Amino acid sequence: MTGRFIVVEGIEGAGKSTCISVIEEVLKEHGIRNIEYTREPGGTAIAEKLRTILLEKGDEKVSDETELLLMYASRVQLVDNRIRPALEKDCYVIGDRHDLSSVAYQGGGRGISLDLIKGLKKMVLGDFKPDLTVLMDVTPEIGLSRVDNRGQGRDRFESEKLEFFTRVRNCYLSEASSDPSIKVIDATQPLEQVKQSVRTVLEDFLCSRG
Ligand code: Z5A
């Protein structure tokens, strides 16, 4: 495959949307016009139905294992139907979340064994992984206050307690410390500085790829 898969990760309100727009800007400055956008969970007709189930607040409790399996069901649909075909056509794919979210949320947040999650990933996606992951790092206090400032209410995940997001954040940072393809951005900085940091990471990535 000649395309590249760039993923943006972080807890809610970390500023993933800002990061995605900077990545798009830098790619275009480098003459890269063949860009696809994905979000997880979701991104295909079936995966979007799974997204609705996963995010809505209903009466029936979603078991942690159900949540994990639905995340992967959605991811396999997306990888098979959109991401791999796009990469094969030399596209750059910018993903709003991918596999690392499952490690951080279902592993770090819910407490499901990381070995089990990584085993499941290996079983359904093999060695498929992003070329670059940009991790937008904020404290849960800042992230959730940004979510609340949007005034759109909180979905099932956003309704979790602060301690949940602290575990998710710690798991993200722990994974980043052992994987050089994950670049951490201090997303508590003022917007212009955050944008500049993302730009630097992207320029370095494109430079290293020739
Ligand atoms: N999930 C999971 O558990 N397991 C998985 O495997 C996957 C996902 C794939 C998806 O929901 C949920 O699924 C997610 C994890 C779980 N949990 N939740 N919620 P989603 O896609 O709807 O939610 P999200 O991915 O967290 O998106 P978000 O809440 O929109 O976060 P964001 O994209 O990072 O936020 P933003 O819109 O870019 O920024 C938030 C606000 O902050 C916005 O008004 C900005 O203008 C402002 N902002 C951003 N940066 C700054 C700075 N630097 N200063 C000041 N203000 C700023």
Image (cartoon, rainbow, N blue to C red):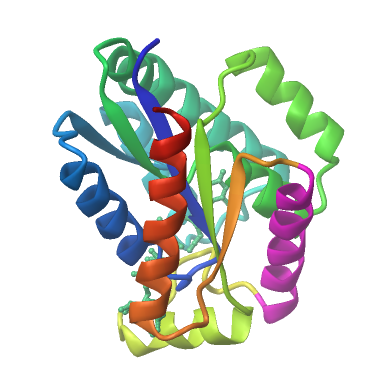
Left-right relation of 197 to 119: left
Q: In this orientation, which residue lies closer to the viewer: 13 or 120? A: 13
Asked if residue 55 is among those painted magenta in the image, a careful observer would answer no
Where residue 52 appears, as percent x and y from the top left, is 37, 48
Q: Image quarter for residue 109? A: bottom right
Query: In the figure, 45 relative to 84: above or below?
Result: below
The rendered magenta stretch, by its main secondary structure, is classed as helix
Where residue 135 appears, as percent x and y from the top left, is 55, 56
Residues drawn in magenta: 161-178
Left-right relation of 121 to 88: right
For image coordinates 62% across by 55% down, the residue present is: 61
- Residue 110 visible, this angle: no
Q: Quadrant of ligand 1?
A: bottom left
Asked if residue 162 is among those painted magenta in the image, a careful observer would answer yes
Where residue 115 appears, as percent x and y from the top left, is 85, 32
For image coordinates 42% across by 58% down, the residue present is: 200
